[in-house]
Amino acid sequence: MRMKQKRTLIGSVIFLTGLVAASAAIAQEKKISDGVVRIGLIEDMSGVYADITGPGAVTAAKMAVEEFGETVLGMPIEIVSADHQNKADIGGAIARKWFDEEKVDAILDVASSSPALAALEVAKQKQKLIVLSSPGSLRITNDACGPYVIHWAYDTYAIAHTTGQALVDQGFKSWYFVTADYAFGHGLEKETGDVIKERGGQALGSTRLPVGTTDFASALLTAQGSGAKVVALANAGADTINSVKQAAQFGLTQAGQKLATLGGFINDVHGLGLNEAQGLTIVEASYWDLNDRTRAWSKRFFDQRKAMPNMLQTGVYSSVLHYLKAVKEAGTDDTGQVMAKMRELPVNDVFYRNGSIREDGRMMHDMYLFEVKKPAESKAPWDYYKLLATISGDKAFQPLSKSECPLVKK
């Protein structure tokens, strides 16, 4: 009789232990809305920005997940991605479907400003978190800002003010713009033009061209005929590469004009080669060769992508890692609680040190002004930059006093 009672007692203990474990698992799953932390990336996978965003951004996000340990609060982390084909309506539609039907918890990048702004509006409507590294439009932290919107890597203000100020102060006071005809290009042209005028220079005109233009002849000839000391390329990706190559064919720099890239990346330098790219000034938020840690991480990235990362891709890595840290600290994937933790925690990783998220959603961090090396100065492939200056975030980014974001108290 006693043996039977003992077996019954042991069985009850096992049952209760299992019940407690199951209850704990259910409670934990409730903290993570559907048992999975699902992160979305809407990129340009095959268009003009594929090399600087696209698959490389997805790789960077997955590297962050791997570094974090591939789970958070005991639940798996999933990266989903899609191609918006550089169309704003597709970017917005993907965001809506992800939030409504596919249980995406946060979108942590959208390549290109127009699709990003469309997805951003959907995220605001759904009260979901969206973090953007690839687009540069200043609107993201101005009139389009929101309580769950973060702008991570850079923006047109930081690029324009750093580049414009440096060149005007060197005596390059007249400018002509060749501009990509969408929000990013418009922002670069406007912000740089404002800096030029503030410092006593002038913008003589601009030509705006659709994204994906292959023939820049007419625009470059107009720029050459303007007599401007600087021909500024307010574009990015393949547009930058094509316009720099064609400017060389027309002999712009040989004739004494300065060619300035306002949306240049290390991938563009690699595509152009140092013979054509040498002397260009480029502003970025990161560089693979800054120190031992950046070199080690970038080598792992290179092994997968056969290219070194740019600031858009390192921005995605950084933002994904910070988001996961915030989920862990918050104990949930609830948007409001995670956002509060993201603002509270400092941003510290391989590429960004002591960063912080401002009330307008701008992630504040250092920016770097580089000059592209001459061929003789480069020691190996991708050894392309000389560091000219490190600009602190408070000087690189738009001050809150100029912000149009309704969240900013003045």
Image (tube, rainbow, N blue to C red):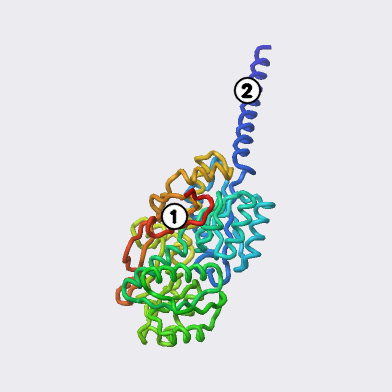
Calculate the distance from the C-alpha at mark 2 to the C-alpha at mark 1. 64 Å
- Give residue 225's position: percent from left, percent from top: 44, 87
Horizontal side of residue 2 vs 198, given as left or right: right
Compared to 252, does 199 lie above or below? above
Horizontal side of residue 34 vs 379, given as left or right: right
The label on residue 401 is 1
The amino acid at mark 1 is Ser
Nearest the camera: 308 or 40?
40
- Give residue 172's position: percent from left, percent from top: 35, 76
Please indicate, yes or no, whether residue 302 appears anywhere in the rendered image: no
Q: Secondary structure at mark 1?
A: helix
Compared to 86, does 19 lie above or below? above
At label 1, counting other C-alpha atoms closer than 10 Å, the crowd grade (few under 14, some 14-19, many 20 or more) is: few
The amino acid at mark 2 is Val
- Give residue 74's position: percent from left, percent from top: 55, 40
Q: Which residue is mark 2?
A: 13
- Give residue 204's position: percent from left, percent from top: 44, 79
Residue with the most extreme top position: 1
Badges 2 and 1: C-beta atoms under 8 Å apart? no
